[in-house]
Image (spheres, rainbow, N blue to C red):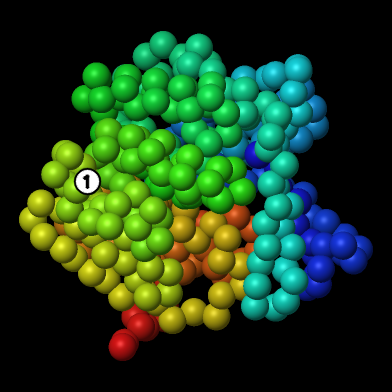
Amino acid sequence: MALARTTEVGSLRHAAGLALGIGGAETNVAVGLRRLGVDAAWLGRVGDDPLGERIARELRGEGLDVRAIVDAAAPTGLMLKERPSAASTAVHYYRRGSAGSRLAPDDLPAGWIENADLLHVTGITPLLSDTARATVLAAVERARAAGVPVSFDVNYRSALASAVIAGPILREIAALSTLVFGGVEEFALMSPDAAESLLDSGVQHVVVKRGPDGAAAFTTAGATEALGFVIDPLDTVGAGDAFVAGYLSAHLEGLDVADTLVRANACGAMACLVPGDWEAAPTRRDLERFLAGGGDPVRR
């Protein structure tokens, strides 16, 4: 979707300027993966408007294989970001009735999922509409049938659906996935013993994002934890997506869980150093430099 953010600290109602860009959880992960050297493709529905054109152009500029379905009957979705104070960020979504909310199973190209090494989805898209939910489930089922691993980031957004409505939907997708990512509260939304129950259902990696406190990964081999990195964050929106991109890239390379968590934490930390959802997502060279001389891990 398109993204507009205020150019100065203060309430949106008094903002004098906006900077225009693109964003969205799936978009951020795709860009993050591509910058780390992973071939990545993106599929979505955009409006027949300048914002939709910008999304496709910028993603192609990042080297993604872009499948942008142009919908002449609905506008491109929009997110507005403001910084009410130097220490806080607020986000406003305008996605109801957007082109993205009209995503349908027929939008999935034949063979596109089956030829991938991994499919990544989030809990945002299935809460946009019934057809969007059907599309995500169709994509997941096609991946499973083809033996393609499925990555799912819970990414619960209360603005899209209540916990009562969202819970069963998120649980269904999580149970069908290979890797599941989420925050402590997001896993609590699904089940009091989410990690154990998901592993019992066949999930191979349950990854808990803890922000500046690092992260933990649960597998059938046990639990692994990694400390976060000390940084002075400028914009934390998109950090979780950069974390996921880092984790997935390392997982695809065959790194062990401990090293995978270190890379993921580093990518999440680096994403906080520049305003924007994905602009600070590191390249492989950036990541190597950060790990070689970056902030020390948090010691508790």
Q: Specify few, some or many for label 1: CA neighbours under 10 Å numbering under 14, 14-19, or 20 or more.
A: many
Q: Residue at x 76, y 17 (%)?
A: 72
Note whether residue 103 is visible: yes
- For residue 176, above or below residue 90: above
Left or right of 2? Residue 288 is left
Mark 1: which secondary structure?
helix
Query: In the figure, residue 46 lies in which quadrant?
Result: top right
Residue 211 place in picture, x, y as percent: 43, 69
Specify the farthest residue to the left.
Answer: 221
Residue 36, how many percent across, how many down? 41, 50
Question: For this rendering, which residue is in front, 255 or 195?
Answer: 195
In this image, 196 relative to 114: left or right?
Answer: left
Mark 1 is on which residue type?
Leu
Q: Nearer the viewer, residue 208 or 50?
A: 208
Left or right: 169 as drawn, with respect to 83: left
Disc 1: which residue:
198
Residue closer to the observer: 258 or 91: 91
How far across and down, in percent of the image, does residue 181 sit?
Answer: 35, 51
Q: Residue furthest bottom?
A: 300
Q: Quadrant of the N terminus?
A: top right
x, y percent for residue 299: 31, 87
Residue at the spot 47% in from the left edge and 22% down from the top edge: 135
Residue drawn at x 31%, y 88% is: 300
How many numbered discs sit on the rendered protein? Answer: 1
Can residue 182 be seen?
Answer: no
To which quarter of the image does residue 234 belong? bottom right
Q: Residue furthest front?
A: 164
136 up-or-down from 195: above or below: above
Residue drawn at point x = 17 percent, y = 39 percent: 201
